[in-house]
Image (cartoon, rainbow, N blue to C red):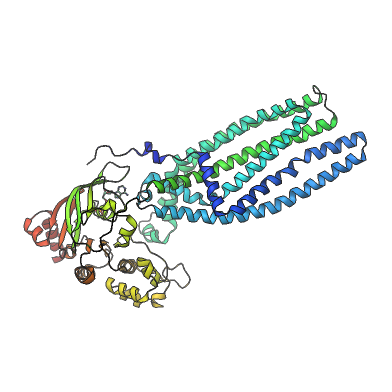
Amino acid sequence: MTATVITDPATEPEQKLPGTVRTLARTMQLAYRAEPRLITLSLAMALLEAVPDSLFAVWLMILGSGASKGSAPMIMVGCFGLAASAVGAWLLQTVGSRVQRTFRMRVGAQLEAHVAGLQASVPTIEHQERPEYLDRLSVLKEQVWQLDHLYLAFFSVVGSLVRLVITLGLVASVNPLLTVLVIFAAPTVWISSKRSAITQQATERVAPHERRHRHFFMIGTTQQAAKEVRIWNIGTDVVRRRRTAWESWYAPLARVRWASAGWQAAGWTVFAVAYIAAIVVTATVFGGTAAQVLLVVTAGSHLSQYVAMTAGNADFLRMCLDASQRLVWLEAYATRHADRASGPIPDRLTDGIVFENVSFCYPGTDAYALRDISVRIPAGSVVAVVGENGAGKSTLMKLMSRFYQPTTGRITVDGLDLEQIPAEPWRARMTGAYQDFFTFELAARESIGLGDLPRSDDRAAVVAAIGRAGAEDVVDRLPHGLDTQLGPTWPDGVDLSFGQWQKVALARGFMRDGTLLQILDEPTAALDAETEHALFESFAGQARTGEAAGRITVLVSHRFSTVRMADLILVLSGARLVEAGSHAELMAAGGLYAELYGIQAAAYRR
Ligand SMILES: Nc1ncnc2c1ncn2[C@@H]1O[C@H](COP(=O)(O)OP(=O)(O)OP(=O)(O)O)[C@@H](O)[C@H]1O
């Protein structure tokens, strides 16, 4: 079951990482916006620190010259200069590193918040489900701490460049021809820059293996997997698989690093030969004085040190840019995917939600998750969606929640294209409870209250939601009632059973009032059939009455005893809608629904 061609992820323009210059400029802009004074001060300190350091060769030359001429004032100037340089370098470095550390901490916290904010700002969830983006985001999450290092690396590059320029000037004062020495340092700089780019490419290539070895580590160490790991006795196998994934991640990276280190060593050999030649030429061909030879020896060795420093810092800067590139990519992604819809949101539903020839393939795949779905869900109805695993039920919910847009066809809400309705206010009029809910480990009141943030502190609203979800039994057993901290890893935290956590999630799903759409995607799968049945009867009752009139409730369940109470039942099979109607209509039609219902009813009778 395949569609024609959708997209080729490898050639999509939005897959490309931005260039390094753009990345550097943007990251600097972000820091300047966050900490304008601290970044200026840090840069000024980096420039100042470079001066006393690189003047050492001058004071040494004056001292050497004074000694050879027997000039006491020159010796005094040389000694005083050396002492002043040493103290100045130390003082500036101490103050500079303090300022830079403060700057780094402050800007780092803001960048982390920026990354989290960007991820949450994208109205769709494609970037959190698509493997290529997941790898990129996983690398960004791993490297988020590196973002602030970029500034340190940048200041260091600036500082080492200043040192390099001063030192080159000193060498040129002996003979301008000696400046060619720096050309022999070029191979090391070039190799260093290539090294980072090659390592970055290799890191991207092996990112899936990195994610896998972390996943296996998580399986081997977390509480969620602990029972199954022991029951299936897969502990050793998990360790072996993690090792294999780690090797697949690490071995190619190590090969690339070793190869580039070899090239770098060759580059340094070239510079070392040129440095020795420069000293010999100064003493012989240029007929330099002892003081001048001393200057070339000192400044020359500093030159190699500063070239190494510049190259090393440039390399570090590149590495840090690697994380920033992903950040700038995420910014561009978030901007490209920003919600531009501006249509009105109906106050209450009068007509309903209509699927018009809707087909959907997950981005980057060409298999249909939903194919040519056309159906009208009337306002005020309770709809059940059934079908085998992978039939497309959850995908249908994701499209209604506007997490994705249909590949072809459209969904309308009271006649208005859902794509024209902005995602955020649409979701503010929705509520949802899912099979794969999240366990928010907060106080019970907060964990439930999150379902309607503006009213999260409203105890009465939380209690009402608990009542609607039938979760009183869970809260009654908590030692401090609604104020009990959930999650066993927190002080005084209590753990809940899976079913209890699910009821908490369900209560969260019932916090909002005045919703237009209520999605219940197997939210009671962990509960027994009778409890589920009773709860759904109550949900259906709530959906059909009072201020909720017009609201559509869509529930996914594999239990036909629950499903039968719905006004409309949609039967999905292999991504297609194969039947739609009430329980009585579908039973009378004698199709797939009737067959599956018969099988399940017989199983219960046995
Ligand atoms: N993020 C995704 N990326 C690519 N394919 C996906 C993604 N999520 C689901 N699919 C595929 O889309 C199809 C429909 O999946 P969906 O989750 O909608 O099924 P479902 O009917 O809800 O199944 P279940 O009853 O097991 O929850 C499946 O073939 C599934 O593999």
Residue at 17 percent across and 50 percent down: it is 374
Query: Which quadrant would residue 285 be assigned to in this image?
Result: top right
Query: Which quadrant would residue 121 be assigned to in this image?
Result: bottom left
Quadrant showing the C terminus = bottom left
| Outermost left residue | 588
Left or right of 416 in this view: 308: right
Provide residue 475's location: percent of width, then percent of height: 35, 75
Provide residue 445's location: percent of width, then percent of height: 39, 72
Relative to 111, say whether 161 is above or below.
above
**Of 522 and 508, which appears nearest the observer?**
508
Relative to 410, say whether 521 is above or below.
below
Residue at 46 percent across and 67 percent down: it is 489
Quadrant showing the N terminus = top left
**Of 527 and 425, which appears nearest the observer?**
425
Left or right of 29 in this view: 277: right
Residue 13 in view: yes
Residue 321 in view: no
Provide residue 458's location: percent of width, then percent of height: 37, 74
| Outermost top residue | 285
**Of 165 and 201, which appears nearest the observer?**
165
**Of 26 and 8, which appears nearest the observer?**
26
Provide residue 397's location: percent of width, then percent of height: 26, 56
Number of numbered callouts drawn: 0
Relative to 410, say whether 560 is above or below.
below
Query: Which quadrant would residue 319 be assigned to in this image?
Result: top right
Residue at 49 percent across and 42 percent down: it is 250
